[in-house]
Amino acid sequence: MDNRRSWKFDLLSLGLLTGLCLFLGIYLIRGTVLVARDGVFYIRQGQQLPQDVVAVARRYPVGYPAILWAAHEAAGNGAVRRCLYALTSTPQTDSTMLWVSSAQAATLACRMLALIPLFFLGKRLVGARHSFWALLILVLLPYPARYGSDVLREWPYLLFLSLGLLLLYRGLEYWNTGILEGRNDGMMGRGAARRHPRFQCSWVLALAGLVTGAGFLIRPECGQLVLYALLGLVFVARHAAPDARGLSDRVPATRDARAATVGAGLLVMAGFVVPVAPCVYATGTILPHQLQPLVVNAPPAIRAVGSQAASYEPLEFAVAEGELLELPITATDPQGGPLVFSLAGVPVGSRPVYELWSPHWGTYFWTITEREKDSLLARHGRAMWEYGRVVCYAYGQPEARPGLRAVHRFWSPARSRHFYTMDEREKNALLQQSGADAWTFEKVAFYAQADGHHPPDTIPVYRFADQGQGFSWALKDPAYHGPSGGDPCHAAIAWYVHPAGEPPAGAAIAGGVLRWRPAPGQKGDYQLNITVSDGELQDCQPVRIRVTADRGPGQGRSGPWPVNRDPGHESRATSPGAQAARLQCAGWERLWEGLAELAEGLLKNLMAVFLVPWFLGLYRRLRHPADPRERVLLPAVIVANLALVLGRHLGVGAGEDRRYSLGLVALTIFYIPVGIDILAGWIDRIHAFWRPRWMKRILPHAFWFCLLIAVGVTVCVPKLLRSGRSDKTGYLAAAAWLRRNTRPDDVLAVPDWRVSFYAERPELLYARHPDSRRADYVVVIGRDGDVPVRDGWRREYSVAVSPGSRDTVTIYRTARSRVDG
């Protein structure tokens, strides 16, 4: 009868908790304007999952994107789509909104399911009554509730973490019973053996390991359950052994007990390996993505020179003789490494020729197009293409200089190599070939000087014949055998190019700023090539400077001069030693900052009002534990989660520490009612001693307990009912404008990729300085002056981030967009 009543109470409690969770989840989803920034990333991983599962798994844990993809596939059903429409009140004909709605619904479902193992785990730790009140508090806490109605992996991770911990706790109970009962396997029948605690412990621990492995694919932090399992097995075995020494006829030998403990630990590991092994086999590593080395080093980028945004075309400036020209160079490196600037003087109108080496094909590749260079390095790994250097300077237009001729580029699929020629007859002969010897004409690679018509400031490019590899090209002496071991006897001059020259006298880059004070007699046009390097990759920006005659004293500047000093200048061109010293000095500061943000995360998740009961409950259980399993698991959970949050902050950087402390809050939420019980007892004793005369009887302990619960709920509910992201309606308005007024292939430079996600346009993410060379539109979020507006940008649209806000979302059209249009 008691067992039946217990199950009725459990079912009723879970029904109330999940129903309230569903109601609040729907309310929060309907009030959500934008999903979290991380949610956009998760949805995009889910969208790419059907095309290449391995590629997604190499970038990020594949578990949560797989859940989102499955939810989206299920949403393709008409009935499910109508339910999502009722849930979110958003038309589901739009593919983006269908992904968003299905992802939010899947996360909410995971939150509701996570309440079930959390309830039974709390029931085993503190009792069913305290477990119900603890989960009621957890359901009403504002921040955890919002995580469960957004596209975030916290609650799916907690679902597997809590289920694995519940199975582990149950398995340790069987293990403890099995040690005390001993082993009488030979005297038991098959049915009795299956009911033996050792057998039950085996499958429960294996199932716990399986759940741990599945959770590991969502967040690698779920692997902490393996540590808990090993600690629990060792601790329970040592704790139960002294109590069983008197039962010599029923307790196994010490050696057998140790072997059984090792076997139980191997069961957990085996269950963990089953779901993780295929992922490790496909990706080649078990390390979390934060600890994996970078496979592709993104090249550095010059964002602006002076007040002008970087461009593939030369930026034009003017200065008079005797005056100082200062052009701050804004450059960034995606990996945050130190940058080194260099300056070269080149002929006016020339462009750098980039050399790439292919270890796969054993050949060099030359291109004058920076877009092509960046595309090859971004799409292929180092096994396919490696960046070499700026090998020389040529021209992109035939009219840039008299006497230029086209260098044609061909590609042979059969030979897997390129071929360059300036000879028109050779070009026509290649175009007429067919079959296996056919060459595909790609384009004019660049324009250069022909033999016999070259100026004295050029150098020859030799073509080497190689019977095994075809031809190779190099800027070497004919005695050199060529990059592929070509025959020097068959070397011929293919064309002439310009080498990198010295900059004009007085021009130099120091501290990330180009400075030049032209001397008298330096009047004329000059072209400089600014190169920024991270030690491996480079980015170039040509600059054309016109030096005019000295206007003499008292004469002001003339002409449309750019603003040469940029207050928003930010350059990372510092020496490695200076950066190392800065990092060393900031080490302790980051540690204290991490501790402060960890405390702040706990304070916000618990809404401050539940922080004192939480500490009191933890103190009571740690000092007077009711169960030896709780004695080892509770400190392990606290220490492991604190270390994970703090380690992530120190290793990866500042982030949403409030979200990452949710695991610690959810697994220890059961001790809040314990602490409230302690507070109610204190108030009860004070009230009994200081009871006012008009109060005829002493209020019961339960009254004070419920009153304290009501006070905490009263604090939580108002904040919970306020929508968390209603202040970003301008993001959606800007996205709608971009969807209506831009082409599907227009690239957006955005500081927040939610704008481009809802606009359904490709984006380039930037922190402070957008790359307008590769973007058609630049989206600036914030107040005027947050991002310097460069020359050539045109303001197209502006809207307030939220009603009454001083921050705006402003859209600028770049010069690239007008040229392409």
Image: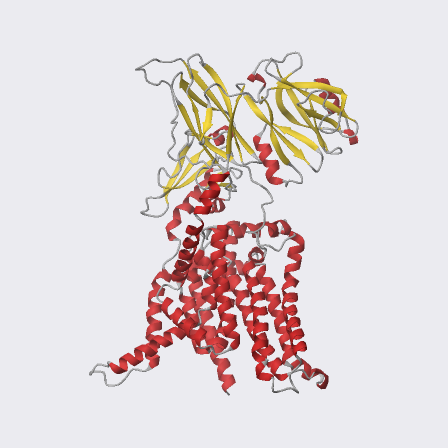
> Residue 767 at x, y = what percent?
45, 42
Residue 526 placed where, x, y %? 49, 18
Q: Is residue 659 above or below residue 294?
A: below
Tell me what residue is drawn at x 51 percent, y 37 percent: 746
| Residue 484, visible in the rendered structure | yes
Which residue lies at the image location 64% right of the left edge and 83% below the top edge? 251
Q: Residue furthest left?
A: 693
Between 296 and 782, the one lying in front of the other is: 296
Q: Is residue 308 above or below residue 604?
A: above
- The correct choice, above or below, for 537 with respect to 603 in the image is above
Q: Position of residue 574 (x, y in %)?
A: 47, 36
For this rendering, which residue is in front, 33 or 629? 629
Q: In the visual, does 77 lie left or right of 546?
A: right
> Residue drawn at (61%, 73%), measured in percent from left and top?
204
Structure colour scheme: secondary structure
Closer to the camera in the image, 488 or 169: 488
Residue 610 can be seen, yes or no: no
How many numbered circles are shown? Answer: 0
- Horizontally, is 69 left or right of 101 in the view? right
Instruction: Look at 47% across and 69% down and name the residue there.
Output: 18
The percent position of residue 279, horizontal first and vertical second, equals: 64, 56
Horizontal placement of 669 versus 59: left or right? left
